[in-house]
Amino acid sequence: MSNGKLPFGLGDWQDSEAYRQFRSNLPKSAQDWVDQATGQGTPPDYQPPAVPGDSYTIPQAPPPAPGSTPQQQAPGQFPGQSGPDINIIDTSSGRSDGLNKCPRCGSTEVSLRVGSGMLVCHFCRHEWNEASLEQQFGLDTDISQLRGTTIASGAGNIQESTKDVLTLKCQACGSEVIVNTAEALQSRCHWCRQTLSVNTQIPNGAVPDGLLPFKVPREQAIASIDEFVKKRRFFAHPTFVKEFAPTEVVGVYLPFVTIDANAHVTYEGHGEILRRSYMVKRGDRQVQLYDADVFHLGRAFDLHVDDIMIESSGARADQDTSKNTNNIINAILPFDVKEAVAYNANYLRGYTSERRDREVDHMGGDASERVLSIGRNRANELTTQYNRGVRWETETLQLQGTRWVSLYVPVWLYSYYQTKGSGAGLTHYVAVNGRTGTTMGSVPVRQGRLIGISTVIGIVGTIIGGTLAWLAIS
């Protein structure tokens, strides 16, 4: 592959007829590549050679826009806040620390009405939602126009020196109230009973750019968790069955970062086309053999990825299954992040929340792998004629631009700590998506019963398989 450098100036290239022809022939999106491949039968970016091993050319990414410098990335090198062309979007509320008032009557007695996902004033019964996060701060612009790195201020760098304890001055009576942001973002004034909230995006990861309010009521979450466990009660550990208490479910806002990416991806590898399949006798057995042609191939296309979700809490991102079942949270995705609203601490009243403690730079490896994985699926859609399969051996991610936004998402969480015979412990979770009601979990199992039934199934399967093989030979 060439290094993509031009022999003359970028302006000369963009003014040339060759460049205009080049741009006019490019598909507008990755979906256009799929549509063209479906209509023509052979992907337009690479014609398979007539003879395996023939040379071919992988298309290069289009020239970068003036003022931007795209970078080729491998997993773990996704650019974050340390690179060039960083654009920070201020998503702070604009309010001073303290009172979050009802826009109609000015009361601070405000909480979330779960069924509707709206805030309700306890004094005048007015209901409202904060503005759409994307529309209010211009986070819904065309991904294909992204250049460099754009970071919403709630996803900015975390300062280790930032204290967990803040002092808020009540705007109603002038008293000072202490708020521990490691535990909550609201407190009551002990003199006038006004509710004080942390609105300013303090640089400790406690205040995100926006959030998704709870829509699934607690009673529905309890019923879902109870039903999930009942279906697995036969294999569940007897101690867990005895101690199971679904009413102990907790509503928690978990921190995530969503990423938009404007990228160009390239994949190279080998594909096989099946020519024939036949049976041959090897001793007493019949063996199926295949004849296939092997091709060296490649795919390259633009990729516009919207709203990749990555855990921004180090504790939740830890996927060590010997210690926890954090992977359960991934099983209840996706969340309708397009419905996220601008941050308002009143949405958090009555719920717990976890604080973001991972920097954008530290999430680069996860983000890079997610983009490449999505591109891999698209590349597979462009190689369906290789009916024996494709093996991608090298892949390259070239970024034009990215956008990072910090969000809280709602989860109903039931946890159970299992102490094993060795003295080690494992935390099991049953989680309910607070928006859709999707439920998934981990239940401690009765190993003896599980092994016994698995053994019986294995023996029965062996007997049936041996009988069928004997009948085929005879």
Image (spheres, rainbow, N blue to C red):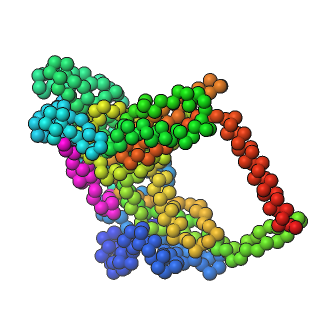
Q: How many marks?
A: 0
Residue at position x 30%, y 76% in the image: 15
Horizontal placement of 444 versus 30: left or right?
Answer: right
Quarter that holds the C terminus = bottom right
Of residues 376 and 469, the one nearer the viewer is 469
Identify the image quadrant of residue 472. bottom right
Residue 85 pos. (x, y %)? 31, 52
Q: What residue is drawn where x is 82% and y is 57%?
A: 466
Q: Is residue 260 magenta?
A: no
Task: Report the side of 198 relative to 258 (left or right).
Answer: left
Residue visible at 29% across and 48% down? 340
- The residue drawn where x is 39% and y is 74% is 26
Q: Quadrant of residue 32?
A: bottom left
Farthest residue to the top: give it: 191
Residue 391 lies, with reference to residue 52, above or below; the image says above
Expressed as whole percent of the image width and height from the top left, the position of residue 68 reads 33, 59
Query: Which is more toward the observer, 271 or 450?
Result: 450
Query: Could you say which quadrant of the image residue 394 lies in?
Result: bottom right
Residue 289 placement (x, y as % from top left): 76, 70
Q: Nearer the viewer, residue 121 or 68?
A: 121
Q: Is residue 140 magenta?
A: yes
For residue 39, side relative to residue 356 (left or right): right
Q: Residue placed farthest to the right in the image?
A: 283
In this view of the protein, can residue 355 be seen by the observer?
no
Q: What residue range appears in magenta?
A: 127-147
Residue 271 point in image, percent of width and height: 62, 69
Location of residue 345 with respect to 297 vertically, above or below: above
Q: In the figure, 371 relative to 365: above or below?
A: below
Residue 32, visible in the rendered structure: yes
